[in-house]
Amino acid sequence: MLDPKLIKESPQIIQDMLKARSVEFDLAGLIESDQKRREFITRTDELRKKKNQVALEISQKKKIGEDISSILEEMKNTSSKLSELELEQENIEKSYLKLALTIPNLVHKSVPIGVDENSNIEIRKWGDLPNFGFKINDHIDISKNLGLVDLERAAKVAGSRFYYLKNDLVKLNQSLIHYGLDFLAKKEYSLIQPPYMINRESMEGAIIADDFKEVIYKVEEEDLYMIGTSEHAMAAMHSKEIIEGKDLPLRYAGVSPCFRKEAGAHGRDQKGIFRVHQFDKIEQFVFSRPEDSWNEHEKMISVAEEFYQSLGIPYRVMLLSTGDMGKVSAKTYDIEAWMPGQNAYREIVSCSNCLDYQARRLKIRFRDKTNEDTQYMHTLNSTLIATTRILVALMENGQTKDGHIKIPNVLHSYMGNQKEIY
RNA sequence: GCCGGGAUAGCCAAGUGGUACGGCGGCCGUCUCGAAAACGGCUACGCGCAAGCGUGCAGGGGUUCAAAUCCCUUUCCCGGCGCCA
């Protein structure tokens, strides 16, 4: 949600944003329904004022025993008129919200304008691409040869895009999570394991309507939705709260499984465990003061980069264009890891500043002094690890001539000093 | 799952049909060389340039001229019983 004052006072800024994102949106309709909404608030407030005055009069006259029959009639009329007006106002409010909740976020001026990922800009690169000197395999063959993943049985039991992890790959998955949590704890993030299902109100605060059918699983007969990332549960964590300014920023490391429908991804990354319905993830989530959020954004991407440097995975940082970026984000960096089996860089991290967009939807505010107005804070999120994708990167980058997988040094202690999977 | 008790502002908390009592904490001011104390104001949201007005007593519905208050319902919390990884 955007600041209604901005929409009212500077519609050109909104118009420019919609153009940059190539999004069709009924801005005139939004402005009109906002104006209508304000008018109705004034009208109903006036009628309520009258009602309050008459109610007071009745109670005073009753006290001294005066006749109230005529004034009672007036009260009746006012009341019924008011409930008519209230009903109308409710409808106006609804149609306003429907538009207000679907307008995308503003775009930072550094974001390249384009329709898809071809307009993304490479910001920097790290690491040398491995030179194997033998015929390499992709993660599907590597894991099959070592008996680490069973896709066929998962398809039988759950469907496509599911998997059974097996043996040392289970250990590696757990080690990555353990190492990732230790890594963020050292940087003074608070560790959070959130609910894996949340209600509709909370989910609507974090995402935009389209995402419900594209990514989110619904639990039947319950007001519950499976989280697509712990971001959803953590954004809603402080909803309807007023935080003391001195407690900001709040830096959280959320760890949870993630569930995604992947509707509309037919045919893409069909095989293996690169794009799946379920994976484990550690997420950085930061609540920050508005003036600090761009600094926090850079900090989060560098935390993620430091993590991948420690694992020795070559990567590049991309600045997403307006066409490749989510509607909730004002600026997004992706980290793409080198995947030798695909001979390509592939997305493993997405790091976004959402400004006050989520905070407005979820009513997450702060103030420094109790007699000052509250302000909406800024929310930011970034992957640290989505484990399945890192398993792919570790298998493909760490493969040896004899078909083993080298484990990065930082993970040895988490693997009980195991240095290779064979 | 059953029975009972609850949900009022950042926290505590009074209020059984007629303008939401107070306290704590916090902020600002007066006083002071400065501070403490004392005193005064402010301390949820909306509309409005403002004066001001309205909304808000867990959510939804109902009764009534009028609901924090009465009725129905949902959610959550506490206690007891039951079941259970």
Image (cartoon, rainbow, N blue to C red):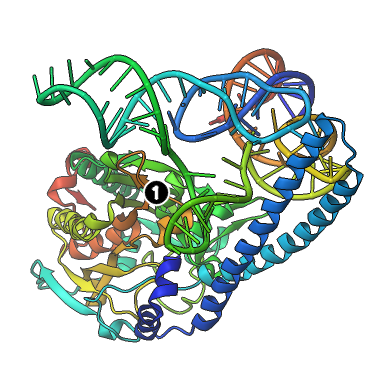
Give the quarter of the image for residue A325.
Answer: bottom left
Determine the residue positioned at 85% across, 47% down.
Answer: A71
Q: Is residue B75 above or below residue A348?
A: above
Judge left or right: residue A183 versus residue A100: left
The answer, for residue A373, to whether it is visible in the render is: yes
| Frontmost residue, A276 versus A216 | A216
The quadrant of the picture occupied by the N terminus of chain A is: bottom left
Judge left or right: residue A392 versus residue B15: left
Give the quarter of the image for residue B2.
Answer: top right
The answer, for residue A279, to whether it is visible in the render is: no
Judge left or right: residue A113 versus residue B62: left
Q: Secondary structure at mark 1?
A: strand
Determine the residue positioned at 78% across, 36% down.
Answer: A59
Determine the residue positioned at 28% across, 68% down.
Answer: A332
Q: Is residue A2 above or below residue A181?
A: below
The picture places residue A24, in percent across and down from the top left corner, at 48, 85
Count the labels in the image: 1
Mark 1 closeness class: few <14, some 14–19, many ≥20 residues within 10 Å: many
Give the quarter of the image for residue A246.
Answer: top left
The picture places residue A392, in percent across and down from the top left corner, at 29, 63
Q: Is residue B61 above or below residue A2?
A: above
Chain for disc number 1: A
The picture places residue A321, in percent across and down from the top left corner, at 29, 79
Return the residue at label 1: A365
The picture places residue B38, in percent across and down from the top left corner, at 34, 16
User: Residue type at mark 1?
Assistant: Arg
Q: Is residue A203 above or below residue B26?
A: below
Determine the residue positioned at 25% across, 61% down.
Answer: A395
| Frontmost residue, A120 versus A217 | A120
